[in-house]
Amino acid sequence: MFKKIILLFSLTVVFVACQDIEKSEKPEDLISEDKMVDVITEISLLQSARNFNKRIFENTGIEGQEYVFEKYNIDSLQFKRSNDYYADNYEIYQRIYDSVKQGFERMKVKLDTLQKKEQRLKDSIAEAKRDSLRKVKDSLNPKEQREIERISDSIINEKDSLNNLVKDSLPNPMSRN
């Protein structure tokens, strides 16, 4: 019986407490959903940049939110009131954040595509260099090729000799004097 009374009392308290939740009124200067998506996206990007390399970001002198607010011609109070209003309206807020997420996904696809293009370009340049070196080597007459090989062998032998000299001049840590 005592458990039923406690349960009934708890339910009553929860029910009464939930009745006083006040939703934000629609502000007169409400930021449109599309603009809110853009603002939240840019603020998120700037915060990520700051977290990624704080020192470089601070050296730019850009204040993240202030920059975004100025760009979109809004102020922090307008943003807060709009954000509070949308947060109280779950479906709209969810739609805004879904749009932000989709925007990030599109950016990631573009970035991946650009990185692949950049890698293909680097590979093409490296291949072109290899081809041009092969062509230069092939264009040399046999006498020039032998001279290049002789010089190359001489350099390798000189390097080996220097390495041995350095190695021989260093004390052996394993020997006891």
Image (spheres, rainbow, N blue to C red):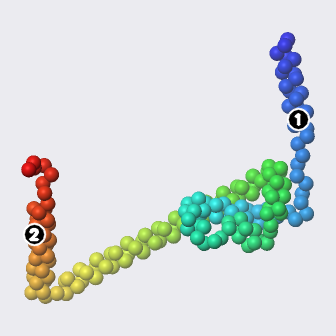
* Above or below, 95 relative to 35: above
Q: Residues within 10 Å of mark 2 (few under 14, many from 20)?
A: few
Residue 50: x and y in percent read: 60, 62
Tell me: 56 left or right of 148: right
Tell me: 11 left or right of 53: right
Q: Nearer the viewer, residue 104 or 53?
A: 53
Res 1 seen here: yes
Residue 126: x and y in percent read: 34, 75
Q: Nearer the viewer, residue 74 or 121?
A: 74
Rendered residue at 56%/65% (across/down): 55
Res 32 seen here: no
Residue 130: x and y in percent read: 28, 77
Q: Earlier in the sequence, mark 2 or mark 1?
A: 1
Rendered residue at 13%/57% (across/down): 171
Residue 136 sits in which quadrant?
A: bottom left
Under mark 2, the amino acid is: Ser
Query: Where is mark 1, residue-wise?
Result: 17
Query: Where is mark 2, residue-wise?
Result: 161
The answer to the question of whether label 2 and label 1 lie on touching residues, with beta carbons closer than 8 A, is no
